[in-house]
Amino acid sequence: MSINLQQLKQTQLSLANQVRLSDDFNELINFIGGTDVGFEDGGNITRAAIVVLSYPNFSVVEYHVARLKTEFPYIPGFLSFREYPALLAAWQQIKQKPDLLLVDGQGIAHPRRLGIASHLGLLLDMPTIGVAKKRLCGQYETLPKQAGNVTPLLDKKEQIGWVLQSKNNCNPLFISAGHRVSQTSALKWVNLCLRGYRLPEPTRWADAIASNKSLFKKLLNEK
């Protein structure tokens, strides 16, 4: 597969200009979604999970997992092109669309301000928030390891997100607005979705469903 990175960079920059970093959603949230993407068969299969939870009790309303042949190689900074086809396939199966979507990955905390949360938000015209487990770019002050500590994530004096200590003695999360959500609201909603674990409930459930973890098996047994 021939990849023109310069052309893809221009595509990212063009799309990034369409991202809206102001709140454009009804804050009376009834349903909140989470996404997770993984790979199987040595990366040949992309596996995407989307879960919809009721808010504020976080009970699982609906979930779908899509598996597609991976068509795009692993290239740091361009992962959204690798991940979004399977996410779109999973999304098409969701009947109860969420009011807000937390995405496992970066929002605008990306060198060209277009991580998977922003890219997916544009494709779906959905308010999205990036919840990443690792930093892609930017600098921040080291946080104390107590839950609740937060500091801005900066890139050349521009705030591109937040670094949040979501659980005691764990690595922090990197929170950034995706699309149709402000940076302030991105942090607020991630905090509202924390229930004592490192990950907020929407992406924690999406990860469990995608990986068939014990949390998901427990859900199946309760049905």
Image (cartoon, rainbow, N blue to C red):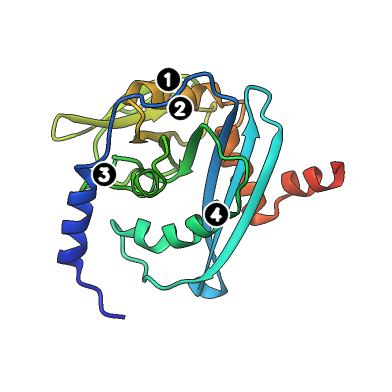
Eye-nearest disc, 2 or 4:
4
**Marks 4 and 3: CB-CB under 8 Å?**
no
Q: Which residue is mark 2?
A: 165
Residue type, numbered disc 2: Gln
Alpha carbons under labels 2 and 4: distance apart: 34 Å
Mark 2 vs 4, N-terminal side: 4
Q: Residues within 10 Å of mark 2 (few under 14, many from 20)?
A: many
Q: Secondary structure at mark 4?
A: helix
Residue type, numbered disc 4: Gln
Residue type, numbered disc 3: Cys
Outermost residue to the front = 95
Alpha carbons under labels 3 and 1: distance apart: 20 Å
- In the picture, measured across the screen, residue 215 lies left or right of residue 9, that is right
Q: Residues within 10 Å of mark 4 (few under 14, many from 20)?
A: few
Mark 4 vs 1, N-terminal side: 4
Q: Which residue is mark 1?
A: 149
Residue 69 higher or lower than 86, as above or below: below
**Marks 3 and 1: CB-CB under 8 Å?**
no
Mark 2 vs 3, N-terminal side: 3
Q: Residues within 10 Å of mark 3 (few under 14, many from 20)?
A: some
Mark 2 vs 1, N-terminal side: 1
Q: Which residue is mark 3?
A: 137
- In the picture, measured across the screen, residue 3 lies left or right of residue 118, that is left
**Marks 2 and 3: CB-CB under 8 Å?**
no
Q: Secondary structure at mark 1?
A: loop
**Marks 2 and 4: CB-CB under 8 Å?**
no
Could you say where residue 202 lies in the image, as x and y percent from the top left? 58, 37
Eye-nearest disc, 4 or 3:
4
**Marks 4 and 1: CB-CB under 8 Å?**
no
Could you say where residue 74 lies in the image, as x and y percent from the top left? 37, 67
Q: Which residue is mark 4?
A: 92
